[in-house]
Amino acid sequence: MAGWKGVGTLGPFDKLMQTLERVPRAGRWGAAVAWMALIFGLSAQTSSGQHSFALVTWLLGLAGQHAGPEALAVMQLGIRKLGHVTEYAVLAALLGWALPSGARRWQLAWVLAVGWACTDEWHQTFVPSRVGAPSDVAIDGVGAALAALGGWRVERRRPR
C-alpha cells in the first residue's frame, strides 16, 4: 500500500490511511448507511431540547460553573449547532470514503450529505416537538463541506 508520503517509516496518519484503504467497499458503505440511520434515529427523538439543556448544565457543573437562563439558552443553541456540523462532517467523510476515487468524489460526498440533511429536516416535521429548519440544512452543509474539503486535501497529498 505504498503511495502515502513518508520518509523512512510511516507516521500514524499514513498508517491509518493504509488501514482504511484495506476496508472493502461494502464495509465502507455499511459505515455510511449506519451513520445515516443514527442521524435518522436522533431526529426521531422528541424533546431533544431537554437533552441538550441537560448536557449543557452537566458540563457547566463539571467545570464548577453555573449560568443564567439567557446564557444557558445561548450555550444550548451552540451545542446543538455544533452537533449538526459534527454529524454531517462525519457523514460526508464516510460517504467520501465509500465512493470510488475520482475527480468529483468529494463533491458528490457533499451533495449526498446535504441531500440527507434535507430529508432529515423533512423527517423532523413529522416528529412531535421537532421542526424542520432550512437553516439547519445550511449548518449541516457547512459540516459536510469541511469534511469534503479535508478529504479532497488528503487525497491531493497522494503522489500520482
Image (cartoon, rainbow, N blue to C red):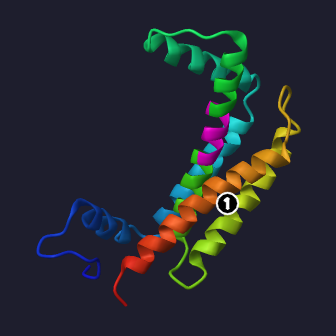
Relative placement, left or right, of 7 versus 56 is left
Q: Residue 27's x, y, as percent?
A: 47, 63
The three-letter code of the residue at mark 1 reads: Ala
Relative placement, left or right, of 21 versus 97 is left
| Residue at the image point whose x is 67% and y is 18% from the top | 71
Q: Residue furthest bottom?
A: 160
Q: Is residue 128 visible?
A: yes
Q: Is residue 156 magenta?
A: no
Relative placement, left or right, of 85 versus 45 is left
| The one of 101 and 6 positioned closer to us in this rendering | 6
| Residue at the image point whose x is 77% and y is 51% from the top | 137
Relative placement, left or right, of 82 versus 154 is right
Instruction: Point out the image quarter for the C terminus.
Output: bottom left
The magenta segment: 79-85
Against 154, residue 136 (above or below) is above
| Residue at the image point whose x is 15% and y is 76% from the top | 7
Picture quarter containing residue 3? bottom left
Q: Is residue 33 visible?
A: no
User: Is the residue marked by circle 1 packed among few (<14), some (14-19), or many (20+) residues within 10 Å?
Assistant: many
Residue designated by label 1: 113
Q: Residue 16's x, y, as percent?
A: 30, 62
Against 149, residue 117 (above or below) is above
Q: Is residue 80 magenta?
A: yes
| The one of 116 and 85 positioned closer to us in this rendering | 85
Picture quarter containing residue 127? top right
Q: Residue furthest left?
A: 8
